Amino acid sequence: MAHSLTNQTRRQFVKTTAAAAAVGSASWSTNTPRKPNLVFLWTDEQRPDTMAAYDNQQIHAPNLNKLASESIVFKRAYCTQPVCTPSRSSILTGLWPHTNGCVANNIPLQEETLCLPELLNDPDYRTAYMGKWHLGDEIFSQHGFEDWVSIEDGYNKYYREDRDQNARSDYHYYLTDLGYEPDTSSGRFSRGFAARRPLEHCKPKFLEQKAREFIRNNRNDPFILHVNYLEPHMPFFGPLDEEHSLDEVTVPKNFSDPLEDNEPLRYRLMREHFSREGWHENPLKTEADWKDLIRKYWGLVTQVDQSVGGILGELEKQGLAEDTIVVYTSDHGDMMGSHRMLTKTVMYEESSRIPWLVRVPSKMGRVIEQPVSQIDMVPTLLDLMSRHEVGEELPGQSLKPLMQGDLVSEDHVFIEWNSSGKKNKVAEIFEDTTEEERDQALNASTRTVVSPDGWKLCLSTAGDKSQLFDLGKDPYETTNLFDSENHPDVIGALTKKIHDWQSKVEDQVEV
């Protein structure tokens, strides 16, 4: 059965799921007769190595570290596509970006495509979405979320025609009620303005307050609460810029990797861009420049950590901790100095991997080393919340067996990068390349597979380089083995894996 879903198929899935929820979820555990709550906490652009569970002992994140100690920690978790809108679409729908249509940023999620609350379809649940959405109609309640708390005003040009282009986010009115005046000619608050506010007026604290209020108001009903922080996403500064001393901060271990000419041209263009242009007030010329940016990034993680601590504390205060599944993750990572690159959109580990914690009531925490994908997020939560097996209606699989120490059917992870097809203006950075070659590289798509034994193959469409890494021996991806002629069997086997997966999920990109 193909895994792309027609509307009829998904409606049938909703009916099946609702029936399963009605008969099974009340027996979540002997200590929790009520249906389990879900608190889904996620960030934007957070690489895994920003907490102790992922080998960063320096960063100040006590609440995340405590949560990790109580959770299933997926040590090698990957997003479906390393950029905001496509990744978010998979996290919420359980569908690949090429299936749900959100293959690039700012493509609205179709109204008929179901998100987790709609898939669960249980009227007992109170539902809320708070924070960044980035899937169209940013500030308007939709997709099964009853309560909606918005923080972003920069996406109004992507609203559907029937939406009010002049409407403002909840955070906008929060700031105006505090006496602030918008800093832009459009009458909106910029992200930079918001990030420069005192800690108690910034977006994470605002979301914490709203989340705690929702928990208090719904403590007697099962609920689904999504809280999505903008941080540590750019503008890469905030009130905790100096939370970490420069002595605490180290550059990534692959910071000085030269990025040879057998690496994708698009990646080398990105690297050169940041080397020449820096990032706003950050010149990014020296190691000291990068360390200063990294410590600001760490400060944003600490800012989120404090907000998470408040939300989890509210669960404890209301006696709901043992009734609540807690998920913590991000939509993708950030290079943040790895290979001297910044931001995301590339297949390197720092961009495509994400933190993923799941705290399940009455279950002990453990670390899972097997690679997993966020395409499995929705099936896993449906399995945990409604106690039914997710079949072929979704392309992913429930990871509940893996969490219990058993095996799952798919042990390879797939990642996609879909070209936007737009014309890109690129400086003539490399003298030995033509404008046509640069345009082809910038518009190339990629399909990647990661094997359980640590091989990673990234196949590009015509116009850019492919990559092969042995992550077991080269975890920082400093040596591309694709053209070495030493691993034809590995390339052949993993290429077949990618093509079989493409056939299964009806992916038409030719790599």
Image: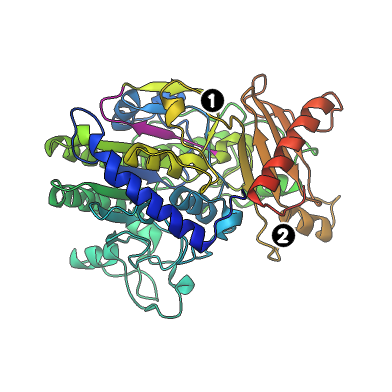
The residues colored magenta run 353-363
Q: Nearer the viewer, mark 1 or mark 2?
A: 1
| Mark 1 Cα shell of 10 Å, populated few (<14), some (14-19), many (≥20) | some
| 99 on left or right of 138 | right
Instruction: Give the amino acid at mark 1.
Output: Gln
Which sits in the foreground, 80 or 149? 80
Mark 2: secondary structure? loop
The CA distance from mark 1 to mark 2 is: 39 Å
Q: Where 352 falls versus 451 (above or below)?
A: below
Q: Which residue is mark 1?
A: 370
Instruction: Give the amino acid at mark 2.
Output: Val
- Residue at the image position 43 percent from the left and 22 percent from the top: 367
Which sits in the foreground, 87 or 46? 87
Which sits in the foreground, 106 or 36? 36
Q: Where 174 falls versus 303 (above or below)?
A: below
User: What x and y, as percent, mark residue 169?
Assistant: 31, 67
| 440 on left or right of 140 | right
- Asked if the residue under mark 2 is in contact with the one under mark 1, i.e. CB atoms within 8 Å, the reply is no
Q: Where 175 falls versus 160 (above or below)?
A: above
Q: Confirm whether residue 404 shows in the render.
A: yes
User: What x and y, as percent, mark residue 312?
Assistant: 23, 37
Mark 1: secondary structure? loop
Specify the color scheme.
rainbow
Nearer-N-terminus badge (1/2)? 1
Q: Which residue is mark 2?
A: 426
User: What x and y, as percent, mark residue 304?
Assistant: 33, 42
Q: Confirm whether residue 242 shows in the render.
A: no
| 177 on left or right of 50 | left
| Mark 2 Cα shell of 10 Å, populated few (<14), some (14-19), many (≥20) | few
Q: Is residue 361 magenta?
A: yes
- Residue at the image position 33 percent from the left and 42 percent from the top: 386
Q: Is residue 192 magenta?
A: no
